[in-house]
Image: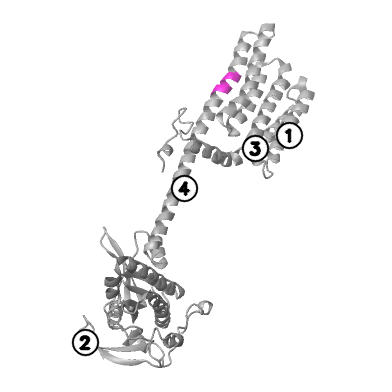
């Protein structure tokens, strides 16, 4: 936040040193005080109506006719001005209209009571008008003084004129000066205090607005580093994202031949390939409501069923894997060269995992921990280009597809051999389509089309990704 916003600096805190901030404040102030000003104008009109009834019932006996004629004019000026500025394009004229109505009303009040030659009556009526002009109408200090001071000074000058004529004595002179001048001084003090408070309110408004923008930027930045699902979970849970047990399917994908490719083409080309690759993985995950847990170089972990649970996570995980493999192979086909082929393999495993914030008070990581996650990584490590390797539990939860085969394999870090179901998308046998949602079905060809493309049905590179 700009240091200019720490406090208004000029004129005892009644002006901002930055002209742009001062200009913005006046626009904000007009919007902020408009309801108060309009309400006060209607209230002033109501007070005038009550005064009219008071005169009708006996007040100002000698001037009843004059008062009964002038008071409705004051009420009309106030209520009419407030109503007139309701129209679009006129609302910005509300404060000037309020000031003008108060100025005319104050002069009429003095003119109406002057024939009484009573400093108390003249001063009281002028002070009533000044009360609205200096406080209720929320006029800026300069405008308030310009609208109120003339008729209060006129009231005081009228008293002086009466004293010179000998109409009133010294005591009435003091009273006639004290009431309007005291009303002007004290009213302006209150007006300045209200203005100072209004400026502080504006500062609070800017602080809140700045904090909201910062929170939005923070959330946007968070979303750039985390998947939308994880970012939303962290945002809602603030600093208290608890670990929960989810039944999920973990889908791990890794590029094949990427180490050799990077050595041959350099880091700059590597970044371009990864950018396309990440975009393909994210697009597939979003389409199936999955969560990209993280990227690690040319590898990625996608969770289906966390942090948003779903009963069909196993079937959705296989559909996602098929779709993701098609998308990623489209990327590798664009970047691969004859001497540096690229490919991708996928491992899938299902089970219960702990998902949430794991770590210390000083540093937390949104992690997924469990056998399914570990097993999907291990399967991905041995998957050849175009292969989807499924853990035994995942395959049993799915319908058998043509071309599936089962093998007993040994995985690094797993003491016993495990059964793996292999779906090889590059074999010429009939394969199940990617089975994407209907509204995006035309995004990429099915697995039959992929298998039929000669440039994809090439010798697989060694798994060094």
Look at mark 1 in the image and give the residue it sits on: 76
Q: Which label is found at residue 416?
A: 2
38 vs 232, nearest the viewer: 232
User: Which of the 4 image quarters holds residue 300?
Assistant: bottom left
User: Which of the 4 image quarters holds residue 375?
Assistant: bottom left
- Residue 455: x percent and y percent? 40, 83
CA gap, disc 3 and disc 1: 15 Å
Question: Who's the residue at 39% across and 65% down the image?
Answer: 233
Observer-side mark, 1 or 2, equals 2
Q: Is residue 180 magenta?
A: yes
CA gap, disc 4 and disc 2: 59 Å
Q: Residue furthest right?
A: 65
* Disc 2 secondary structure class: loop
Q: Residue furthest front?
A: 338
Q: Is residue 215 magenta?
A: no
* Disc 1 secondary structure class: helix
Compare marks 3 and 1 and give the one earlier in the sequence: 1
Q: Quick check: marks 2 and 3 in contact, CB under 8 Å?
A: no
Q: Quick check: marks 3 and 4 in contact, CB under 8 Å?
A: no
* Disc 3 secondary structure class: helix
Range shown magenta = 179-185
Q: Which label is found at residue 94?
A: 3
72 lies left or right of 357: right
Residue 243 showing in the rendered view: no
Look at mark 4 in the image and give the residue it sits on: 209
């Amino acid at each position: 936040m700009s240091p200019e916003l720490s406090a208004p600096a000029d004129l005892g805190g009644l002006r901002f040193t930055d002209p742009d901030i001062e200009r913005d404040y006046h626009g904000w102030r007009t919007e902020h005080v408009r309801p108060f000003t309009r309400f006060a104008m209607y209230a002033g009109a109501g007070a005038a109506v009550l005064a009219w009834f008071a005169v009708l019932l006996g007040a100002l006996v000698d001037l009843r006719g004059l008062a009964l004629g002038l008071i409705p004019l004051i009420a009309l000026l106030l209520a009419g001005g407030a109503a007139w500025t309701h129209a679009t394009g006129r609302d910005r004229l509300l404060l000037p209209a309020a000031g003008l109505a108060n100025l005319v009303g104050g002069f009429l009040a003095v003119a109406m009571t002057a024939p009484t030659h009573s400093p108390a009556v003249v001063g009281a009526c002028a002070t009533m008008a000044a009360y609205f002009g200096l406080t209720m109408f929320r006029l800026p200090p300069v405008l308030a003084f310009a609208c109120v001071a003339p008729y209060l000074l006129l009231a005081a000058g009228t008293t002086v004129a009466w004293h010179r004529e000998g109409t009133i004595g010294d005591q009435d002179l003091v009273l006639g000066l004290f009431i309007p001048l005291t009303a002007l001084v004290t009213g302006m003090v209150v007006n300045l205090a209200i203005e100072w408070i209004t400026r502080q309110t504006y500062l609070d408004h800017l602080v809140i607005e700045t904090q909201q923008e910062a929170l939005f930027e923070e959330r946007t930045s968070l979303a750039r580093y985390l998947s939308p699902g994880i970012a939303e979970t962290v945002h809602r849970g603030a600093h208290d994202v608890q670990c929960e047990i989810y039944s999920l399917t973990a889908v791990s994908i890794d590029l094949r031949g990427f180490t050799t490719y990077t050595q041959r083409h350099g880091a700059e080309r590597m970044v371009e390939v990864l950018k396309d690759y990440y975009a393909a993985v994210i697009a597939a995950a979003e389409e199936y409501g999955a969560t990209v847990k993280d990227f690690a170089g040319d590898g990625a972990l996608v969770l289906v069923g966390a942090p948003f649970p779903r009963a069909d996570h196993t079937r959705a995980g296989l559909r996602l894997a098929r779709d993701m493999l098609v998308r990623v192979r489209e990327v590798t086909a664009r970047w691969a060269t004859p001497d540096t082929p690229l490919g991708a393999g996928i491992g899938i495993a299902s089970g219960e995992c702990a998902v949430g914030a794991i770590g210390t008070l000083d540093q937390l990581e949104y992690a997924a921990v469990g056998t399914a996650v570990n097993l999907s990584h291990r399967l991905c490590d041995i998957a050849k280009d175009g292969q989807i390797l499924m853990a035994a539990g995942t395959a049993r939860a799915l319908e058998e597809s043509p071309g599936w085969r089962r093998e007993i394999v040994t995985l690094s870090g797993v003491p016993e051999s495990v059964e793996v179901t292999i779906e090889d998308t590059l074999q010429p046998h009939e394969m199940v389509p990617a089975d994407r949602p209907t509204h995006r079905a035309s995004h990429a060809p099915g697995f039959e089309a992929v298998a039929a493309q000669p440039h994809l049905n090439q010798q697989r590179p060694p798994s060094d990704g």
